[in-house]
């Protein structure tokens, strides 16, 4: 087994826990449908690397939109922990500030359906508040099954609503961010309240929702040539310099290892 890419730089969150500045994104997988495979990889890693410990890695997962009712939040987390083969998450996020209706699916032991669609139409849970879900997340953190809690794809208004109602600031807001979507308002807001902003799709948005539109950008390639780096390393380093933690994705081993080799960008270049 190839050596696991590492980068020991971290950012301290508002709850005192530390998040790595760079990780591996798996966001092209269907919601919550890659966790069994990730769990298998962790077991292989544990078997082949005798010094490997659970605390050596930082695991983030998200509650999908049909898991937002308080009674389903814990069920969803328990299923995630079972699939991953771990007894805690380092970070658990509310995936979107929108609530889908939970549709019963007898093939899922917890009674939770990942894709709450009926005849092509999405079913929305209009009676549920994002505050209710956030309160359930606060309880999860108290249980010890989750070290840090946060949100994803939340605007400033969404964040302020749950903070005003609970007094608890999310440790992280994970959003799409890259040089074409710099998220300045969220960054400034996060700095003011102590909420870290984590960036998925650091290589740019679409094509088609897998991102990576900036890897071939002439300016990015020119900067990479000046540093003797590749475009992915430049874009990850840009995000980290901005204050994000970044989550590049790749299925190629060499690219995954390369992405972790971030460096300090010089403003003059």
Image (cartoon, grey):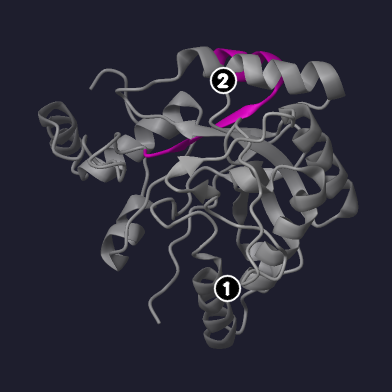
Q: Estimate the x, y position of residue 92 in percent, counting from the top left.
A: 68, 47
Label 2 and label 1: CA atoms lie apart by 31 Å
Q: Nearer the viewer, residue 119 or 108?
A: 119
Q: Nearer the viewer, residue 261 or 130?
A: 130
Name the N-terminal-most of marks 2 and 1: 1
Mark 2 touches mark 1? (CB < 8 Å) = no
Tag shown at residue 155: 2
The residue at 80%/33% (across/down) is 132
Q: Is residue 241 left or right of residue 166?
A: left
Looking at the picture, does residue 5 appear above or below residue 13?
Answer: below
Looking at the picture, does residue 134 appear above or below residue 36?
Answer: above
Q: Nearer the viewer, residue 122 or 6?
A: 122
Whether residue 178 is visible: yes
Helix, strand or loop status at disc 2: loop
Mark 1 lies on residue: 39
**In front of the other: label 2 or label 1?**
2
Q: Estimate the x, y position of residue 180 in percent, counting from the top left.
A: 30, 23
Q: Estimate the x, y position of residue 91 in percent, counting from the top left.
A: 67, 48
Query: How many numbered marks, from 0 up?
Result: 2
* Magenta-drawn segment: 188-201
Quarter of image, res 181:
top left
The residue at 10%/30% (across/down) is 218
Helix, strand or loop status at disc 1: helix
Q: Estimate the x, y position of residue 205 in percent, counting from the top left.
A: 30, 34
Whether residue 264 is visible: no
Q: Is residue 179 left or right of residue 72?
A: left
The residue at 49%/32% (across/down) is 175
The quadrant of the image that shows the N terminus is: bottom left
């Amino acid at each position: 087994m190839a050596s696991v890419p590492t980068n020991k730089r971290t950012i301290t969150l508002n709850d005192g826990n530390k998040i790595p500045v760079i990780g591996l994104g798996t966001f092209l997988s269907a919601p919550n449908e890659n966790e069994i495979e990730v769990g298998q990889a962790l077991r292989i890693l544990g078997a082949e690397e005798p010094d490997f410990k659970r605390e050596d890695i930082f695991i983030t997962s998200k509650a999908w939109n049909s898991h937002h009712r308080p009674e389903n939040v814990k069920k969803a987390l328990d299923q995630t922990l079972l699939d991953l083969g771990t007894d805690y998450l380092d970070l658990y996020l509310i995936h979107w500030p929108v609530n889908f209706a939970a549709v019963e699916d007898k093939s899922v032991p917890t009674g939770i359906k990942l894709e709450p669609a009926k005849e092509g139409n999405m079913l929305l849970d209009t009676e549920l508040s994002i505050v209710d879900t956030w309160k359930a997340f606060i309880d999860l953190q108290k249980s010890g099954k989750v070290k840090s809690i946060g949100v994803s794809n939340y605007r400033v208004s969404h964040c302020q609503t749950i903070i005003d109602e609970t007094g608890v600031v999310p440790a992280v807001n994970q959003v799409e961010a890259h040089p074409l979507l710099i998220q300045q308002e969220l960054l400034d807001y996060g700095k003011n309240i102590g909420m870290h902003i984590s960036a998925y799709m650091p290589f740019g948005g679409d094509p088609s929702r897998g991102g990576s539109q900036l890897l071939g950008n002439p300016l990015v390639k020119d900067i990479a040539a000046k540093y003797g780096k590749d475009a992915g390393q430049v874009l990850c380093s840009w995000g980290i310099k901005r204050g994000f933690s970044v989550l590049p994705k790749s299925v190629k081993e060499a690219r995954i290892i390369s992405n972790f080799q971030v460096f300090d960008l010089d403003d003059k270049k």
